[in-house]
Amino acid sequence: MELLREAGFHPLEVIRAATLKGAEALGVAHEIGSIEVGKMADLVIVEENPLQNLKVLYGTGAIKLTDDNEVVRVGGVKYTIKDGIVYDAKELLADVKRMVEEAKEKEGYEIYQPGRKSRPQPK
């Protein structure tokens, strides 16, 4: 998305490219890609206007300056609707984070500094 925006596309064109135009390219625009009676529709719901800032469509939102010059995080996907079921995006993110942590712990997974094959020994 960001690459299209940086190339000069209007945010609405970027959203269309990701939805309707993508469905057309795949030959499935009669089933998905826009909201119409009879089409399948998985949706994301955000609290900010993506036409003003596409980054609010990112799962974690975007950084924004308030009128008081304070940095705040805004937007982000609030809900996802998939196959008619409403999911709370923040709860899903927390669940995935927990699953990853549990899997790493179970496997004894650790990240080492690049170029090292083992953990540095304390001095």
Image (cartoon, grey):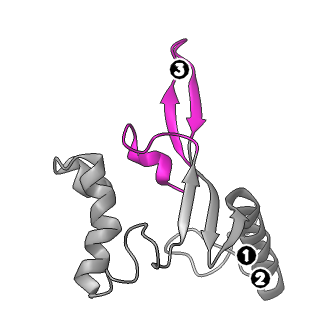
Is residue 121 inside the magenta stretch?
A: no
Picture residue at 40% right of the left edge, 40% below the top: 53
Nearer-the-camera pick, 18 or 104:
18
Q: Mark 2 points at which residue?
A: 103
- Where does residue 84 sit, x and y in percent of width and height? 65, 74
**As displayed, is residue 2 above or below residue 116?**
above
Q: In which quarter of the image is residue 32?
A: bottom left
Q: Name the residue under label 1.
A: 100
- Quarter holding the C terminus? bottom right
Q: Quadrant of residue 87?
A: bottom right
Q: Could you tell me which secondary element the residue under label 1 belongs to?
A: helix
Of the residues shown, which amino acid type is indicated by label 3?
Thr
- Where does residue 98 sit, x and y in percent of width and height? 79, 70
Dots 2, 1 in contact, CB < 8 A: yes
Mark drawn on residue 48: none
Picture residue at 42% right of the left edge, 45% below the top: 50
Label 2 to label 1: alpha-carbon separation: 5 Å
